[in-house]
Structure formats: C-alpha cells, structure tokens
Amino acid sequence: MVAFVNRFALGSAVLALLALAIPLWRLGRRRSGAGVLGTYEAVFAQSPHGMLVVDSSSNSFEIVDANLALQRSLGYDLEELRQMPLQRIFSDDGGAPEALLAQLRETPARLLIETGQRCRDERLVHVEISGYRIDVGARSLFALTTRDITMRRRVEAQLLEKQHHLDHLAHHDQLTGLPNRLFLAAHLPGAIDEAKRTGAMLAVLFLDLDRFKHINDSRGHATGDKLLKAVAQRIRSTTRTDDIVVRMGGDEFIVVLKSVTTSDQINETASRITDALAAPVLIDGRPLVTTASIGVSLFPRDGSNMGELLRQSDTAMYQAKDRGRNNFQLFSPVMERKLKERIAVESSLRAALQAKQLDVHYQPIVDIESHRVVALEALVRWRHPTHGFIPPGRFVAVAEETGLIVPIGEFVLEHAIEDAARWRASGAAAVPISVNISAVQLQRSDLAATIARLTRTHGVSPGMLQLELTESALFQRREGRNGESSQDAIARLRELGARIAIDDFGTGYSSLSYLKQWRVDYLKIDRSFVRDLVTDMSDLAIVEAIIAMAKHLNIEVVAEGIEGWQQLEKLRQLGCPYAQGFLLARPVPYEQCRGYLTGQPLDLTCQLPVLHELEATGS
Ligand code: C2E
Ligand code: MG
Ligand code: MG
C-alpha cells in the first residue's frame, strides 16, 4: 500500500516536472490502455534522468524510491539506497553536505539546488536537483529529479578560467607583467577608502625614467623594452608585497604605498627605488644606466581621490625633472601654482607668437678700453596686452619645455638678420649681432639650414652672426635631428661662418678643457661673478682665473652685467677686453640703436651706476 501511495505521488510529481510525461500518458492510454499508473511507472523507470522520492516527514529524510537511472549512476541498488542517509549520496564538492538537507527541512513547495553526487566508487558527479513537495495526508514527500551537470560545470570552469585570463590581460602590462592603468583605476580607490577607514596615510609615487626616449631612439626599441622589464623588476623588488606597482605606459610607473605612517617611510622607499635603478642594467652584454624622476603625493594631505593624487604626483615629478632629474620631490601647493602659471604662460605665449606681441631689443657689447660697440646682443621681448612686460626669464624655460622656443628662436634670428640688413642699408657701422640659442633649438631644428636660408634671403653674411649657447646646451648628450650630436651641429654652424660664444660662463660645467675641444670664439662671464667682483675676493679670483685662462686659449672674454664704475675699472685692470651691462648701455628697440652704431665710442660721461630697479623694467 505504501509503495502504491509512493508511486502514485511520484507519478504526480513526474507529471508536473516533465512535460514529457503528458504526451506519454496520452500515448499510453491510447495504445495499451494499461492505465495512468502504469504510464507513470514507465516514465519513472525509463527516465534517463535520476529520479528519487524522499520522505521529509522524519528528520532522517529517507529515500523511499529511486529509479533505475539513479541506481545505475550511483552504483547502488534500491535496497541499499533505502538504507542510506541522504547526505551520504548528495554532498557539495567537499563543501556543505547539509545544503540539500537544509533546503528539504524548509519544506519548500519547489526545490532547485546544485550539489555533488557521491557514487559507490567515490566519484563525485555534479548534479542539479529539482523537485516538488507532495503532501500526502500528513506526510511530505519530495519527488526529485537529478541531472548530470558535470559537462556544464566543466564548460563554466573553462569559461571562468578564460575570463580570469582575459581579466589578467586587461589589467596587466604585457611587456613587464606589472599591473596596468586599468588595474590602478580598479584598486586605488579601494586603497584610499581603506586609508580613510584606518586613518592611515597613503603615498602615490609617480616615476618617470630620465631620457628614456633617447635610449629608445639610440639603442633601439628592443633594448628599450628590455630596460623597462629590468626597471619593473627592480621597482617591484624594492617595494612591499601589498604596495601597488603599476606601469602606466611608456616609461611611467606608479607605486602606491599603503598604510604610510611617517614621511621617512616615503623617503626610504623613493631612495631605495633610485638606488636600485642606479646600478647599470646589462642588456645584451652592454651596461645601460638609467635614472628616474619621482614625484610624490600624499593622501589625505594632497588630495582625497585618485585623480587628485595622480595629478599632484605628476606635478611633483615634473618638479623633480626640473631639479636636474634623478631625484624625488614631494608635492607642494607652490608646485601646483607654478604649474598653473606655466600652463598659462604656455598658452598665452602661443597666442603671443601669432599676435606679434614679441619683439627684439639690442644691448651693446663694448670694448672696455675704447668704449666702442663691438657687437649687439639680441634679446627677445614680450609685451603682453594686459600683463605688460614679461621678462625672458619667465617664459624662455617654458618655451624650451614646450618646443615653442624653436619658432620663437627663428623669429628672433630673422628679426636680428633683417635689422642687420636695414642698418647696413642705412649706412650704420656694421657690428655683429649676438643671438641667444637654446639647446632645444640646436636639437630639434636644423639651425644651420635656417641661418643659411635667412641670411641668404636678407643678404647678410652669416659671419655677422654670433651664437650664444649655454654650457648645458654644449653638453647636451642627447642626439638631435637625424642623430646629429650638438658638437656636429655646432661644427656646421661654424662652417657657415657664425661665431660661437658660451653664455653665462661659470654657472654650468665650467670645465676648462672643453673650451679647447669646442673651439668657442668667446665666453661671457656670468653676471653672478661680476656683481660682487669688487667686494668678494673669491669672485675676484674666479673672474681673474677665467680671463687668464681664456687669454691662454686665445678665446675672447665678455663680462656680463656691469652696473658700476668700480666693476668696470676692476675688469679693465684684470685685462678683460669686453663688457656688457646697464652701466654701459641698456637693451633698446631697433629705432633707438642708431646711437650705438655710429662707430664712435659710447659717451659714458653721464652714466650713473645702475640701481637694481632697472632690472625689472625690461629695457
Ligand atoms: P643672457 O643671454 O645672459 O642675457 C643677458 C641678460 O642680462 C639680459 O636679460 C639683459 O637684459 C640682462 N642684463 C644686461 N646687462 C645687465 C646689467 O647690468 N644688470 C642686470 N641685472 N642685468 C643685465 P634678459 O633680456 O632678461 O634675458 C635673460 C635671459 O633670457 C638671457 O640671458 C638669455 O638666456 C635668455 N634670452 C633672452 N632672449 C633670448 C632669445 O631670443 N632666445 C633664447 N633662447 N634665450 C633668450
Ligand atoms: Mg646671452
Ligand atoms: Mg648671459
């Protein structure tokens, strides 16, 4: 009787579960007339899916019936199954054997669960169990169907693995294996939140390799790639495992230091990174040295979100570059102000070039003994419509960084060459024009070709030009256009007939030996040595030594920034042949230069020592 009830109940469940049963039932009635129950029994017995009936009335959840498919797949016969606790057969993959029981205990109307099916031979088959509760009098039975989902699970696992792999690819840099920008975007906000919760500081280090482009250009991209890999490893090895190290792209890396408690911690890490990078990297048997500039921003001091912290660390990194590279700088609000100013200067400078707000003034270089003008130095001037005069000291550096110095330099050159032609046409005394040339111009443009073209156009001899280069421009190791070294570029300028001067001498490398090597025509002693010449014995000694050495090497000398009679007299006594300074003559526009070009000595009788306010006037 029990068996009858069970079978009947199960039949209802199967009918409800399997749409398949309905056509079968109709078929069965029509064909054999064996009755509904017989049909259900056939469905139960022949179903390819495992089926079982569980009595959930008692806490033991006995198996009341199980079809052949289930018996076969488990390797137990019905009698054995009836003796077995349900959890012996259905248990999660080593996880929760109770998962099915827990659901059954709740006696839901429907049930759907994925679990493991442990076979006689201990094989674990992944199954999906679905079923209905059937209430028969006071008893609650569950009619369950099991479906082997091993294949589906396998496919899912493969898909998951593929997904992980794709995720890894998307969040990691192929070359170095380090996490990338996307990874940072996914993890830095969380790290910031964590720092917020714990009240700790967090540091963002923005690291940019110095002169990497040069290495890439001169040694090839394959070498550049190997260097980046080595750098990535070194950075990773100097940081803690829970710090985030990311390659942002190119030669830029970000290191996020979590739970920073003291600023010493940041200094230590930054120093460790710079030290680690300092050791040469052996690439294809050849040592390669690289350094990095690092900018640091701190949460919460410098920013409260990822965008701010990255921006501030980038600003600080530029400051590190400005300070000569191979160092690290902590962000400060002053930096931001400077950066904003720099950006503002850059955009208005571009406009200034278009709007012809730039002009050129000329300051004489004078023979100390005869007071005759021996050359005119062309100095760029910018009159801003609202800000007024902006001294070159405030925009030349920005122009150099942005490359704007190339068109500006060409503008000054053309202006100067044109003016020289006009002076000659007007019968004024012919004196060479000295033009300041920035290292960037030397590198990025074909200066010799530009000068040849401009002098040809205006009918001026290139010999009328003197080019003032700073020591750092001469020492640029970077190769310029077409791989030309600055030494070669200068040699071509000399071939044209232009004379070469070293400007601001003493402020750069001041290596005496290179003077000979570079065959410069004259050098200009920087104003900082001349200023206290009369009172400061060490300045006097330096100036004296420079003059003596230049004489020995047959190089001419100009002392810059003469503002007082005593300075001029001292220089005369030291045998300095030429001088330039506000005391002698100030920079003036073209129209006022005629007085300098009479060929006669300058009349200095009414000149007064210059007060420093003049410096700011711009003329
Ligand atoms: P510099 O080439 O050393 O030019 C001399 C600077 O000293 C000029 O400043 C000049 O006005 C100033 N000076 C001359 N005599 C005295 C003096 O007695 N006392 C004082 N206090 N200053 C004196 P300026 O015109 O402001 O130019 C500053 C620097 O800007 C120049 O230094 C040069 O390095 C750069 N510069 C100016 N024009 C150009 C240009 O056309 N191209 C490039 N690349 N740089 C330029
Ligand atoms: Mg100069
Ligand atoms: Mg100078």
Image: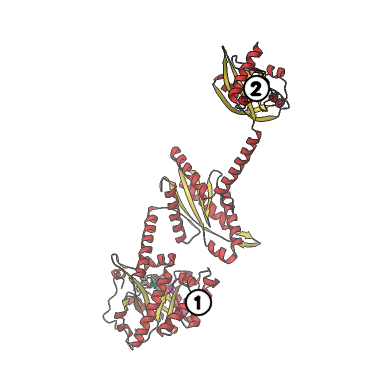
Left or right, 549 with respect to 580, comes to right
Residue at mark 2: 30
Residue 28 horizontal side relative to residue 477, left or right: right
Q: Answer yes or no: disc 2 within 8 Å of ligand 1.
A: no
User: What is the quadrant of the C terminus in the image?
Assistant: bottom left
Q: Which of the labelled discs sits on residue 190, or is there none?
A: none
Q: Nearer the viewer, residue 615 or 204?
A: 204
Which residue is tagged 1? 490
Q: Earlier in the sequence, mark 2 or mark 1?
A: 2
Q: If the image is split into quadrants, where does the N terminus sit?
A: top right
Answer few, some or many: residues within 10 Å of disc 1's Cα (few below 14, many 20 plus, some between 14 and 19): many
**Residue 260 in sight here:** no
Residue 245 horizontal/vertical position (percent)? 54, 49
Residue that protrudes farthest toward the top in the picture: 1
Amino acid type at image mark 1: Ile
Amino acid marked by disc 2: Arg
Q: Which residue is drawn at the image coordinates 59% and 65% (left, top)?
A: 219
- The quadrant where residue 99 appears: top right
Residue found farthest to the bottom: 427
Q: Which quarter of the figure has residue 434?
A: bottom left
Q: Is mark 1 within 8 Å of ligand 1?
A: no
Frontmost of labels 2 and 1 is: 2
Quick check: can you spot residue 610? yes
Asked if the magenta segment contains residue 515, the reply would be yes
| Numbered disc 2: secondary structure | helix
141 falls in the magenta region? no
* Magenta-highlighted residues: 498-517
> What separation in Å lies between label 2 and label 1 (alpha carbons)?
107 Å
Q: What is the x, y in percent for residue 212?
A: 54, 61
In the rendered image, residue 564, in percent from the top left (x then y), is placed at: 32, 75
